[in-house]
């Protein structure tokens, strides 16, 4: 079941994200350069930061099966729209699980993702979802050995960083600041989305000309 953000907390988080981004008319790129940029909190922005495209915040846990399902259905559409300058995508990798082995699985994968440079991060994200431990709630996985291999496959040699889990505590510190009830949580310009976040056509309509669900 797809859980949701608390409405008030959601608005605060979305406004905070919007506040750090520069703006010009929706979908119109001022620089024409779409890049993937890592923020101080570990989030990744795929956008032309000089445009005023709508902002799509994606909160995901790499050990979450529903996140994997959403990724398989709409990630290509999200990336396409970002490359076209029609949306600014902010990927927030979080750890939502409290029980084991899910919690440790999630932390290892998220910490490893922070080691991977921007140029390889999206490919690494694909690799991580492809090897998500199953069955959920039972299987341990995302070992540091698996994660270093995934990083290398994505084009990044960051073995020491992944193995030492250098960013594990930083990841947990930032996750604690986000009042999530569950993942995936998708927010479009401050408005929380529901099932349309899993439908590429519906999601594209919302991004390019519609609005999300009012909260």
Image (cartoon, rainbow, N blue to C red):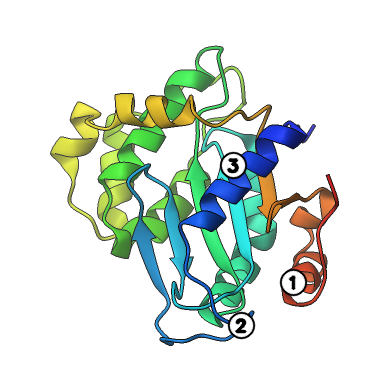
Residue bearing the label numbered 1: 204
Residue located at (37% from left, 31% from top): 171
| Image spot of residue 91 (x, y percent) | 51, 52
- Residue at the top extreme? 99
Q: Quadrant of the N terminus?
A: top right
Please indicate, yes or no, whether residue 7 appears anywhere in the rendered image: yes
Mark 2 → mark 3, Cα distance in angstroms: 23 Å
State yes or no: discs 2 and 3 in contact (Cβ < 8 Å): no
Q: Is 149 on the left-hand or right-hand side of 200?
A: left
Task: Compare residues 120 and 206 and report the one nearer the observer.
Answer: 206
**Of 123 and 24, the residue lying toward us:** 24
- What residue would you read off at disc 3? 13
Q: Is residue 4 visible?
A: no
Mark 2 vs mark 1: in front: 2
Residue 117's place in the image compared with 107, above or below, is below
Q: What residue sits right under mark 2 in the picture?
A: 25
Q: Position of residue 20 (x, y in %)?
A: 46, 57
Q: Which structural element holds mark 1? A: helix
Q: Tell me what residue is drawn at x 19 percent, y 28 percent.
A: 164
Query: Residue at (60%, 49%) from the top-left corner?
Result: 15
């Amino acid at each position: 079941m797809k859980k949701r953000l608390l409405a008030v907390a959601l608005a605060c988080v979305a406004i905070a994200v919007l506040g750090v981004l520069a703006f010009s008319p929706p979908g119109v790129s001022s620089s024409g350069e779409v890049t993937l940029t890592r923020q101080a909190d570990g989030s990744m922005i795929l956008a032309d930061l000089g445009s005023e495209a709508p902002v799509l915040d994606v909160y995901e846990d790499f050990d979450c099966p529903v996140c994997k399902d959403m990724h398989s259905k709409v990630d290509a559409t999200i990336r396409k729209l970002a490359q076209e300058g029609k949306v600014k995508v902010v990927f927030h990798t979080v750890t939502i699980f409290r029980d084991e082995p899910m919690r440790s699985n999630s932390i290892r994968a998220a910490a490893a993702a922070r080691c991977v440079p921007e140029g390889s991060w999206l490919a690494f994200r694909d690799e991580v979802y492809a090897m998500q431990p199953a069955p959920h709630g039972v299987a341990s996985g995302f070992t540091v050995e698996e994660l270093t291999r995934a990083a290398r496959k994505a084009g990044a040699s960051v073995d020491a960083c992944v193995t030492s889990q250098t960013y594990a505590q930083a990841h947990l510190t930032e996750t604690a600041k986000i009042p999530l009830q569950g993942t995936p949580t998708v927010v479009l310009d401050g408005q929380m989305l529901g099932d349309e976040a899993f439908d590429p056509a519906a999601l594209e309509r919302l991004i390019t000309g519609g609005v999300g669900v009012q909260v």
